[in-house]
C-alpha cells in the first residue's frame, strides 16, 4: 500500500474517533514510546524522544485544564493538575538520571489512563491513574 493510501486511512480513522478515544491513543503512544526507550537503554536519542513526547502530552493536558471552556468540576481539575505535576517531576527525574527504571511509573500512569478512557468513558481520568501514597497501598 502506498504511503498516500496509508496516510489517507490514518486521517479517516482519526476523524471517526471520539475525543476520549484520541486521548486513549495518545496515552498509549506515550506508554509505548517510553517502554521502547526502556528496552533500548543505550539509545539516548530514543530515551529523550520518548520523554519529550510524554512531556508534550502532559503539557497539553495542563493547558486544557486552564481553558475557560473546560467544564470539568474544580475538584477533578485539581486532581488532574496534581497528577500532571507528579508526571512533570517524574519526567525531570528520568531526564536527569537516564535510568530506564525511572520510566516505569510514567508507563504505568499512561497505560492506566488509556485503559480507563477506553473502558469507562464517563469517569474522570485522574481518579484511576493518580499515584497511591504508601498509606493507601497498604
Image (cartoon, helix red, strand yellow):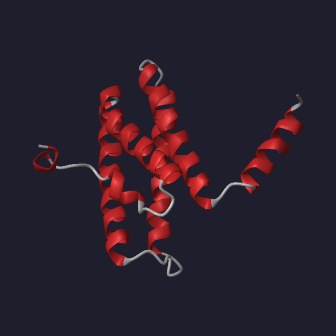
Q: Name the residue rendered at 54%, 80% in the picture.
A: 69
Marks counted in the figure total: 0
Horizontal arrangement in the rendering, residue 81 relative to residue 10 (left or right): left
Assign the C terminus to one quadrant of the image.
Answer: top left
Horizontal arrangement in the rendering, residue 93 relative to residue 137 (left or right): right
Residue 20's place in the image compared with 72, above or below, is above
Q: Name the residue rendered at 51%, 59% in the picture.
A: 121
The answer to which of 87 and 18 lies nearer the viewer is 18
Residue 118's place in the image compared with 67, above or below, is above
The answer to which of 51 and 34 lies nearer the viewer is 34
Q: Position of residue 65 (x, y in %)?
A: 45, 70
Q: Position of residue 71 (x, y in %)?
A: 48, 78
Query: Can the viewer see residue 15?
Result: yes
The answer to which of 55 and 126 lies nearer the viewer is 126
Query: Can the viewer see residue 56?
Result: no
Q: Position of residue 5 (x, y in %)?
A: 88, 37
Q: Name the residue rendered at 49%, 50% in the picture.
A: 119
Horizontal arrangement in the rendering, residue 92 relative to residue 56 (left or right): left
Q: Name the residue rendered at 34%, 33% in the picture.
A: 104
Residue 138's place in the image compared with 18, above or below, is above
Assign the N terminus to one quadrant of the image.
Answer: top right
Q: Position of residue 16 (x, y in %)?
A: 74, 55
Corner quadrant of residue 3: top right
Amino acid at each position: 500500500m502506498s504511503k498516500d493510501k496509508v496516510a489517507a486511512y490514518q486521517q479517516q480513522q482519526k476523524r471517526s474517533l471520539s475525543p476520549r478515544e484520541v486521548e486513549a491513543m495518545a496515552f498509549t503512544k506515550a506508554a509505548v514510546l517510553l517502554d521502547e526507550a526502556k528496552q533500548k537503554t543505550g539509545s539516548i536519542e530514543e530515551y529523550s524522544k520518548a520523554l519529550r513526547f510524554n512531556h508534550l502530552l502532559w503539557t497539553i493536558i495542563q493547558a486544557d485544564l486552564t481553558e475557560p471552556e473546560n467544564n470539568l468540576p474544580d475538584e477533578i481539575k485539581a486532581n488532574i493538575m496534581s497528577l500532571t505535576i507528579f508526571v512533570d517531576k517524574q519526567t525531570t527525574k528520568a531526564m536527569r538520571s537516564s535510568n530506564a527504571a525511572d520510566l516505569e511509573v510514567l508507563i504505568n500512569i499512561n497505560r492506566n489512563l488509556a485503559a480507563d478512557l477506553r473502558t469507562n468513558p464517563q469517569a474522570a481520568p485522574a481518579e484511576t491513574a493518580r499515584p497511591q501514597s504508601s498509606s493507601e497501598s497498604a
